[in-house]
Amino acid sequence: MNFRILFPKPIPEMYQGMVIQYKVSPLLNIPMEWITEISFVSKPNSFIDYQLSGPYSVWHHQHHFEETPEGVLMTDIVTYKLPLGKLGEFFAGSLVKRKIASIFDHRKKIIDEIFR
């Protein structure tokens, strides 16, 4: 997705109300702006971000962290809706679902490499 954080730089410690501006290319490498807000923070257990503007009609992402004997378990709960309702879902639903899965697969791979 050519995911790049534009603002803020450098990223400060996360706080409720923090707005983050990205440049992403979700489909056909067409760049677009994505702006999210951190709506909830419970350090070190969880935080939630949601889209203010961007490629989705709705984007709500819960990040949960739980300490276990094996390390930290990260759980993501993502709720999203595509633009154009059923038409958007018909034309791009399966592609977007695979794209989101690949993003989280990539993140897992990078985190596993860093904390191996």
Image (spheres, grey):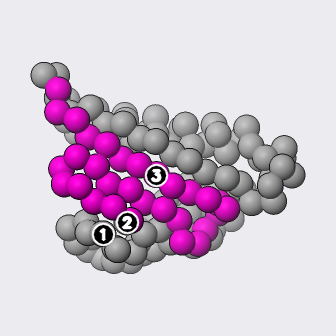
Amino acid at pointer 1: Gln
Q: Are marks 1 and 2 in contact (CB under 8 Å)?
A: yes
- Residue at 84% of width from left, 44% of height from top? 90
Near mark 1 (Cα within 10 A), the count class, few <14, some 14-19 or many ≥20, is: some
Q: Is residue 113 left or right of residue 33?
A: left
Amino acid at pointer 2: Ile
Earlier in the chain: of badge 1 and badge 2, it is: 1
Magenta residues? 39-68
Q: Is residue 42 left or right of residue 57?
A: left
> Relative to 116, is 50 above or below?
below
| 38 in the magenta segment | no
Residue found farthest to the left: 69
Task: Compare residues 7 and 1 and report the one nearer the observer.
Answer: 7
Query: Can see residue 39?
Result: yes
Query: In the drawing, what numbered circle is on residue 61?
Result: 3
Pinpoint residue 52: horizontal percent, then vertical percent.
54, 72
Pinpoint residue 80: horizontal percent, then vertical percent.
61, 51
Amino acid at pointer 3: His
The residue wearing badge 1 is: 16
Near mark 3 (Cα within 10 A), the count class, few <14, some 14-19 or many ≥20, is: some
The residue wearing badge 2 is: 38
Q: State the SS at label 1.
A: loop
Earlier in the chain: of badge 3 and badge 1, it is: 1
Q: State the SS at label 2.
A: strand
